[in-house]
C-alpha cells in the first residue's frame, strides 16, 4: 500500500513537467529563466535539458515503481491461487464417498484448474488495483482542475453515465456466464464418460448418438457464447463511444479558451495528455467491477459444489492427534440408518453389537448394502440416524488418523494410484515425514525456497523428499522386517506363490540391488544342478558362446551380450552406428533383406490393422512405426535396396534389436544362424569396440542387465512355447526361498510400475494389494468386502484361518453375498432389504410417523412373498408406495369376469380366493384356489383389458392391492420378477390344459358308454 501511494506524486510529475517544458522552456519570452526555489538562473536550452532530464527520471522511477507493484501483485495472485486450489483439493479428501461417486471427476478438475485460474488474478488485484487506479484517477483529476475548472468538469461529465450503464450490461453478461460455466462442466463430464466408455460405445454402436449428444451440448455452448459476445462487444462499443466524447469537448471548449487567451496552449496539450491517461484507470476500474461480479459468481458456483453435506469436520482431519489410541472393545451399532442421496434407506434401524476380537461374517445379497456397512464402519458415510461406537468411542468424533491407523478396509476393486506397487502398498505407513534427506547445497537452497513459498501460500509444509515410511506402525523395526511381514501376509492369503512368480519376471539394475545380483550369480551352479536333477536341462536355452539362442534378438546373438537398456530406449543414432558396423562387416545387405522378409511376413499375418492383436503386441513392435516399415519393404520389393536412403535403412535395422529368431520363425534360416556365430568369433575385435557402448557381454560370472531375475538365475531364456516353463519356475522359486531371498524378490515387486489407475499392473495383483494394504498396518478392525469370494470352500477356510492366526486380537469382518464356511465364524449376520434378517428388532414398533411405519409394513408384506423377495430396495419401495390395504368380508366377490383391470393386482395376506371361469350359459367352473402369498389379477394388468375370471372369497379376506402403474414399472425393470410371473403364467396354462384334457377324456368315456348301451339294445 505504501509503495502504491508513492506512485501518485511521480504520476503528477509526469503530467506537470510536459506542461512546464512547453510553457516555461520552449515558449519562454526571455533567454534566461530564474528558478525561485533553487535561487539560480539558467539559459533557455539548459533549462529545457534540466526539465527533460527531470521528466525522463520521473518516467523511469514511475515505471520501475509500477513494475515492482505489478510483480508483487503477480506473486500475491499466484500465492492466493495456489492456496485456493490447495484448499479445494483438501476438501475433496473430506468429501463423503457417496458424493464422490455421483460427482464427475472431469467437473471437479475443470473447477480446480480452468475455473479457478481467473480467480487468482482477482485475488491479487482485490485491494491494490482499486487503490492504484482510483489514486491515479484522482491525481489526474486534481491536475485537470488545476489547469481549468472547465477541463475538470469536462473530464468527469460522462463518468456517472458510464458508472450506471456499464454495470447493468455486465450483470446481464454475468448471468450468461453462469450458464456457460454450468454447460462447460456438463461437457467436461461427458468428455470424461466418453473417454472411459469408448469401448462400450464402439461395441454397442453408440458413437453416433453420443456424438449427436455432444454436438447438442456444443451447440448450446455456442449459442450462449454468441449471446455473450454480442452483449460484451456492444458494451465495449458504448463504453468507447462515451469515452471518446470527452476529447470532443476538450477540443471544442479547450480550443475556444485558448483562442480567447483564458488557457495556455501548453495547458491544453497537458490536459489532453492527462485525460488520455485518465481513461486508462477509469477503464481499469470498470473492468475491475466487472471482474468482481464475475468472480463472485464463480466463487458461488465453486463453493456450493465443494461444500456437500456429510463432509468430515476439518478439525478431525487436519494435523496429527497427540496419541493414536487402539480401538479395543466391542463395536456397537445403535439403531443406525444409512440413506442414499435421494433419501432412500440403504440400512434401516440396525442395532448390533460385535464383541471384541470376534470373527464376523456379514452376508448381504445387495452389493449396495455391503458397501454401506463397510463405509459406515470406516466413516466414509455418516448415518442419517443412530450412532456407531468402537470401544465406547463415537466413530463420528474420532480423528481421521485414528480411523486410518486402526481400521483396515479392503475391497475387490480398490483404486490404485499411479506410481509403483510398493508406493501403493506403503500408503498406510506414511503418516508423517520422518528422516529428512540430506541434499547438496545447490539443491538445498532451492528446496528451502520452495518450503518457504509453500508456507506463505498456506500449503502443506511437510517435506516431500523425506522418508515417510514408518515400519513401527506395522509392528516391525525396519524395512527388511516390513518386507518379511508383507510376505507372510500374501502367503496367508494364498497369493504368495503367484506374486513371487511375477517377481521372477522382473528386470532390475544390479547397482540398485547389488546383494540380490551377487547372490543370484553364486546360486547359478546350484540352480543348474537342480534343473538337471529334475530333467529340465533341455527345457530352456542356456547361454553358450558356441550356440545360437533363438529367444534372444539377433543383435544380442551377434554380440553374445545383453542390452544395457530396454529396446524401446534405443535411439536413431544406435541403429545408425549398427549400420556402420554391418557395413564394416559386409553384412548390411543381408541384414536389410532379412528385415524386409520379416516385415512382409508380419504384414501378411497381421496386416496394418491387426497391430492390436495380442500376438502382435507380444513382439514388442511399435504399431505406429510398423506401417512405415511396411511401406519401406514394399519399396524394396518394387525396386531394390539401392533406392533406400540412409535414414530408411536405419529404420529397417531397428528390427534386429526388437525380434528374435523364435518370433521370426522359418524366415530365420539355420545358415543365417551359423553365419552370425562365425562372425561372433571371427570379428570379435571389431564387435567388442561397438558392444562396449550399448551392450554388456554375457558371462556366467557376471550379472546380465536387461534380463529378468529368472533368466539371470538359470543363465538362459525360456522358449516361447513348451510346457516345462512352469516346472523351471518352481525349481528357481524353491531355491530362492531356501536361500531366504524372498524379501529381495518382494523389493523388486515394490518397484513394479502400476500405471494410471493400476492399468499397468496385472489384474491378479489388484486384490492382494487391497488386502495387504489394509492389513499391513496391523489394524484393530479389519474389514474385507468380497475379498474371499472363491469357489473352493477349502481355500476359503484356509484363508480365514490364516488371517485369524495373523490377527488374533483384531475384529475381522468378512462381507460377502453368501458365506460357504459359516462354521468358521464366531458371529453370522444376514442383511436383507436393509435390515438384519430374523432379528427381534423387526418386530419392534418403529417410532416414526404413521406414513413411514405404514410403508415399512407394506414392504415387509411384499418381501415375505416368494414373488417379490428378490426385488431390490428401491423398486420394493416404489411398489409399496403405490399399494393399498384391502379387506373383504366372507362370501363376496372382489371382482367379476369382464370387469376393468385397472384397479390393480391383489397380493393375498390372509384368507383364500376362489377363481371361477364363467361359461356363456352362466355356469361357474372353478379354476384354482389361491392362498396367502399368492398374487391374483396380475395377468390382466400385463395384457391390459378386462378380467378373465371371477374372484370369490368364501372367508374373511385381507390383501395388499398393487397399483397398476407401479406394478408394470417393476415388471418392466426387474427381470427376476418378470421371470417368476412367466412361471406362474405357465402354471395357469398347464392347469387349464390339464382341465381341458380331463374334460375331453370324460366326454369320450361317456360317448363310449352310450355307444355300448346302444349296441346292447
Image (cartoon, rainbow, N blue to C red):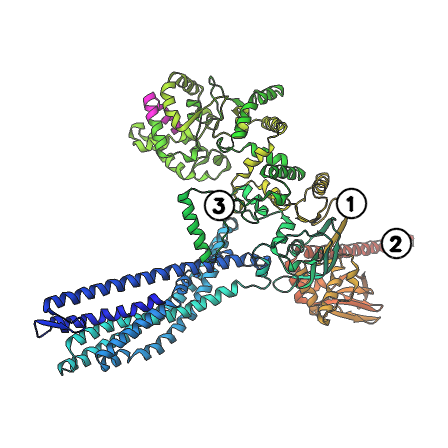
Q: Earlier in the sequence, mark 2 or mark 1?
A: 1
Q: What range is drawn magenta here? A: 580-597
Report if the CB atoms under discs 2 and 1 are less than 8 Å apart: no
Q: Earlier in the sequence, mark 1 or mark 3?
A: 3
Nearer to me, 414 or 634:
414
Q: How many marks?
A: 3
Vertical placement of residue 438 versus 952, above or below: above
Along the horizontal axis of the image, is 771 left or right of 701? right
Circle 1 crowding by C-alpha within 10 Å: few under 14, some 14–19, many from 20 = few
Q: Nearer the viewer, mark 3 or mark 2?
A: 3
- Is residue 582 magenta-colored? yes
The residue that label 1 is drawn on is 823
Vertical placement of residue 831 versus 167, above or below: above
Q: Residue furthest front?
A: 39
Report if the CB atoms under discs 1 and 3 are less than 8 Å apart: no
Mark 3 to mark 2: distance in Å? 104 Å
Q: Secondary structure at mark 1?
A: helix
User: Could you tell me which residue is drawn at 31 percent across and 68 percent down?
Assistant: 6
Q: Position of residue 626 (x, y in %)?
A: 40, 36
Q: Position of residue 718 (x, y in %)?
A: 54, 26
Nearer to me, 955 or 483:
483
Q: Position of residue 766 (x, y in %)?
A: 59, 43
Along the horizontal axis of the image, is 37 left or right of 952? left
The disc at residue 133 is none
Q: Nearer the viewer, mark 1 or mark 3?
A: 3
The residue that label 3 is drawn on is 465
Vertical placement of residue 326 versus 862, above or below: above
The residue that label 2 is drawn on is 1009
Along the horizontal axis of the image, is 737 left or right of 1014? left
Amino acid at each position: 500500500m505504501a509503495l502504491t501511494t508513492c506512485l501518485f506524486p511521480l504520476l503528477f510529475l509526469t503530467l506537470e513537467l510536459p506542461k512546464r517544458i512547453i510553457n516555461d522552456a520552449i515558449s519562454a519570452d526571455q533567454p534566461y529563466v530564474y528558478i525561485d526555489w533553487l535561487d539560480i538562473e539558467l539559459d533557455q536550452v539548459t533549462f529545457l535539458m534540466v526539465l527533460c532530464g527531470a521528466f525522463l527520471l520521473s518516467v523511469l522511477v514511475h515505471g520501475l515503481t509500477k513494475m515492482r507493484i505489478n510483480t508483487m501483485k503477480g506473486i500475491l495472485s499466484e500465492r492466493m491461487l495456489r492456496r485456493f486450489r490447495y484448499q479445494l483439493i483438501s476438501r475433496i479428501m473430506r468429501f463423503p464417498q457417496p458424493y464422490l461417486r455421483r460427482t464427475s471427476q472431469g467437473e471437479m478438475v475443470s473447477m480446480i484448474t480452468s475455473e479457478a485460474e481467473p480467480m487468482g488474478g482477482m485475488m491479487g488485484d482485490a485491494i491494490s488495483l482499486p487503490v492504484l487506479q482510483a489514486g491515479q484517477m484522482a491525481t489526474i483529476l486534481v491536475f485537470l482542475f488545476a489547469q481549468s475548472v472547465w477541463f475538470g468538469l469536462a473530464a468527469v461529465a460522462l463518468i456517472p453515465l458510464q458508472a450506471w450503464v456499464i454495470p447493468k450490461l455486465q450483470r446481464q453478461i454475468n448471468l450468461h456466464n453462469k450458464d456457460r460455466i454450468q454447460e462447460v462442466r456438463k461437457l467436461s463430464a461427458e468428455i470424461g464418460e466418453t473417454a472411459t466408455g469408448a469401448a462400450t460405445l464402439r461395441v454397442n454402436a453408440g458413437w453416433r448418438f453420443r456424438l449427436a449428444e455432444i454436438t447438442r451440448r456444443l451447440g448450446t455452448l455456442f449459442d450462449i457464447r454468441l449471446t455473450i459476445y454480442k452483449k460484451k462487444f456492444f458494451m465495449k462499443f458504448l463504453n468507447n463511444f462515451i469515452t471518446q466524447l470527452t476529447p470532443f469537448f476538450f477540443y471544442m471548449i479547450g480550443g475556444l479558451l485558448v483562442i480567447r487567451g483564458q488557457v495556455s496552449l501548453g495547458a491544453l496539450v497537458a490536459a489532453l495528455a492527462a485525460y488520455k491517461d485518465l481513461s486508462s484507470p477509469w477503464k481499469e476500474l470498470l473492468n475491475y467491477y466487472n471482474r468482481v461480479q464475475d468472480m463472485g459468481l464463480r466463487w458461488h458456483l465453486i463453493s456450493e459444489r465443494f461444500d456437500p453435506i456429510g463432509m468430515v469436520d476439518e478439525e478431525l482431519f487436519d494435523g496429527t492427534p497427540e496419541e493414536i489410541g487402539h480401538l479395543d472393545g466391542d463395536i456397537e451399532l445403535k439403531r443406525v440408518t444409512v440413506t442414499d442421496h435421494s433419501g432412500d434407506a440403504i440400512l434401516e434401524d440396525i442395532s448390533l453389537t460385535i464383541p471384541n476380537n470376534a470373527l464376523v461374517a456379514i452376508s448381504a445379497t445387495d452389493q449396495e448394502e455391503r458397501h454401506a456397512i463397510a463405509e459406515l464402519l470406516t466413516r466414509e458415510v455418516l448415518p442419517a440416524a443412530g450412532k456407531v461406537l468402537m470401544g465406547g468411542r463415537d466413530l463420528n468424533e474420532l480423528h481421521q488418523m485414528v480411523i486410518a491407523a486402526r481400521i483396515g478396509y479392503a475391497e475387490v476393486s480398490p483404486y490404485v494410484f499411479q506410481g509403483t506397487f510398493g508406493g501403493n502398498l506403503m500408503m498406510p505407513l506414511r503418516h508423517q515425514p520422518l528422516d529428512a534427506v540430506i541434499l547438496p547445497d545447490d539443491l538445498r537452497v532451492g528446496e528451502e525456497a520452495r518450503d518457504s513459498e509453500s508456507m506463505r501460500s498456506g500449503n502443506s509444509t511437510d517435506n516431500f523428499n523425506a522418508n515417510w515410511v514408518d515400519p513401527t506402525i506395522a509392528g516391525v523395526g525396519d524395512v527388511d522386517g516390513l518386507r518379511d511381514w508383507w510376505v507372510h501376509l500374501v502367503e496367508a492369503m494364498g497369493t504368495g506363490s503367484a506374486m513371487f512368480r511375477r517377481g521372477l519376471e522382473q528386470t532390475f539394475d544390479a547397482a540398485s540391488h547389488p546383494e540380490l545380483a551377487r547372490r543370484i550369480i553364486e546360486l547359478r551352479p546350484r540352480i543348474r544342478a537342480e534343473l538337471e536333477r529334475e530333467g529340465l536341462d533341455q527345457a530352456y536355452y542356456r547361454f553358450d558362446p558356441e550356440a545360437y539362442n533363438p529367444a534372444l534378438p539377433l543383435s544380442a546373438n551377434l554380440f553374445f551380450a545383453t542390452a544395457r537398456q530396454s529396446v524401446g530406449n534405443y535411439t536413431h543414432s544406435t541403429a545408425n552406428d549398427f549400420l556402420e558396423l554391418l557395413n564394416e562387416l559386409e553384412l548390411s545387405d543381408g541384414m536389410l533383406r532379412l528385415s524386409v522378409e520379416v516385415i512382409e511376413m508380419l504384414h501378411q499375418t497381421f496386416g496394418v490393422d491387426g497391430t492390436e492383436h495380442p500376438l502382435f503386441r507380444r513382439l514388442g513392435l511399435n504399431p505406429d512405426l510398423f506401417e512405415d516399415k511396411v511401406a519401406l519393404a514394399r519399396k524394396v520389393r518394387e525396386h531394390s535396396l539401392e533406392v533406400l536412403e540412409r535414414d530408411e535403412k536405419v529404420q529397417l535395422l531397428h528390427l534386429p534389436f526388437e525380434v528374435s529368431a523364435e518370433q521370426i520363425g522359418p524366415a530365420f534360416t539355420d545358415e543365417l544362424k551359423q553365419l552370425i556365430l562365425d562372425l561372433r568369433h571371427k570379428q570379435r575385435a571389431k564387435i567388442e569396440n561397438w558392444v562396449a557402448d550399448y551392450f554388456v557381454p554375457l558371462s556366467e560370472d557376471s550379472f546380465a542387465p536387461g534380463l529378468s531375475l529368472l533368466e539371470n538365475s538359470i543363465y538362459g531364456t525360456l522358449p516361447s512355447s513348451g510346457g516345462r516353463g512352469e516346472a523351471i519356475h518352481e525349481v528357481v522359486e524353491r531355491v530362492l526361498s531356501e536361500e531366504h531371498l524372498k524379501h529381495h524378490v518382494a523389493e523388486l515387486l515394490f518397484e513394479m510400475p502400476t500405471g494410471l489407475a493400476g492399468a499397468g499392473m496385472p489384474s491378479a495383483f489388484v486384490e492382494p494389494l487391497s488386502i495387504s494394504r489394509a492389513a499391513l498396518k496391523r489394524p484393530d478392525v479389519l474389514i474385507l468386502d468380497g475379498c474371499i469370494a472363491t469357489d473352493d470352500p477349502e481355500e476359503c477356510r484356509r484363508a480365514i484361518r490364516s488371517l485369524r492366526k495373523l490377527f488374533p486380537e483384531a475384529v475381522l469382518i468378512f462381507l460377502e453375498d453368501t458365506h460357504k464356511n459359516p462354521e468358521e465364524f464366531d458371529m453370522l449376520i444376514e442383511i436383507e432389504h436393509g435390515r438384519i434378517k430374523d432379528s427381534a428388532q423387526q418386530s419392534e414398533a418403529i417410532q416414526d410417523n404413521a406414513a413411514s411405519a405404514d410403508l415399512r409394513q407394506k414392504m415387509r408384506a411384499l418381501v415375505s412373498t416368494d414373488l417379490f423377495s428378490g426385488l431390490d430396495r428401491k423398486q420394493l419401495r416404489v411398489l409399496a408406495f403405490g399399494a393399498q390395504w384391502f379387506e373383504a368380508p366372507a362370501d363376496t366377490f372382489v371382482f367379476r369376469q369382464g370387469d376393468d383391470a385397472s384397479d390393480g393386482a391383489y397380493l393375498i395376506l390372509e384368507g383364500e380366493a376362489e377363481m371361477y371361469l364363467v361359461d356363456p350359459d352362466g355356469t361357474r367352473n372353478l379354476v384354482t384356489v389361491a392362498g396367502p402369498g399368492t398374487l391374483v389379477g396380475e395377468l390382466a394388468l400385463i395384457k391390459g383389458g378386462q378380467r378373465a375370471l371371477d374372484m370369490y372369497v368364501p372367508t374373511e379376506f385381507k390383501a395388499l392391492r398393487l397399483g397398476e402403474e407401479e406394478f408394470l414399472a417393476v415388471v418392466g425393470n426387474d427381470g427376476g420378477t418378470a421371470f417368476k410371473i412367466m412361471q406362474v403364467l405357465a402354471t395357469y396354462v398347464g392347469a387349464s390344459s390339464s382341465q381341458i384334457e380331463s374334460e375331453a377324456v370324460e366326454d369320450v368315456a361317456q360317448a363310449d358308454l352310450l355307444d355300448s348301451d346302444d349296441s346292447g339294445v
